[in-house]
Image (tube, rainbow, N blue to C red):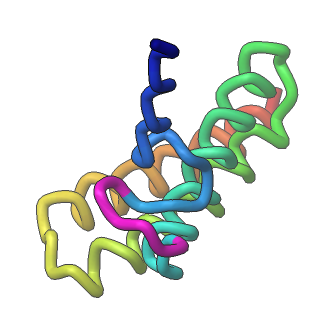
């Protein structure tokens, strides 16, 4: 008898939320956009490109908005601090 092939795990399907067989909502979408911007910003800073700070700032604004809507205030404070550090980083980079 032929073995049945197991079904793919739906949580690994891009564009789908874990455990739900429906497309991800906008809240999840913007979280992934912010993740992509943050990682790209990291890569640019490693390569000594100041554009990385700008990408980080954009990602932080997305996450601040996202966490404000979910009332996760500790994360809001954390990403406000990260944004302030990004602005200082941009200004320091321009100075030198």
Q: Residue furthest bottom?
A: 69
Identify which residue, 91 or 53, lies in the foreground.
53
Residue interval drawn in magenta: 18-23
- Spot occupied by residue 70 in the image (x, y as percentages of width and height): 21, 80
Residue 61 shows up from this direction? no
The residue at the point 65 percent across, 63 percent down is 58
Identify which residue, 74 or 89, lies in the foreground.
74
- Is 14 rendered above or below residue 27? above
The residue at the point 29 percent across, 57 percent down is 19
Quadrant showing the C terminus: top right
* Magenta stretch, overall SS: loop
Q: Residue furthest front?
A: 1
Residue 19 on the magenta segment: yes
Q: Is residue 8 left or right of residue 69?
A: right
Q: Is residue 50 left or right of residue 60?
A: right
The residue at the point 51 percent across, 15 percent down is 2
Q: Is residue 49 left or right of residue 87?
A: right
């Amino acid at each position: 008898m032929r073995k049945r092939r197991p079904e793919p795990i739906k949580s690994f399907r891009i564009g789908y939320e874990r455990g739900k067989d429906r497309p991800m909502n906008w809240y999840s979408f913007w979280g992934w956009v912010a993740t992509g911007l943050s990682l790209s910003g990291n890569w640019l800073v490693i390569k000594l490109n100041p554009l990385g700070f700008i990408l980080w700032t954009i990602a932080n604004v997305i996450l601040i908005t996202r966490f404000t809507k979910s009332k996760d205030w500790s994360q809001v404070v954390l990403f406000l601090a990260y944004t302030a550090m990004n602005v200082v980083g941009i200004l320091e980079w321009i100075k030198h």
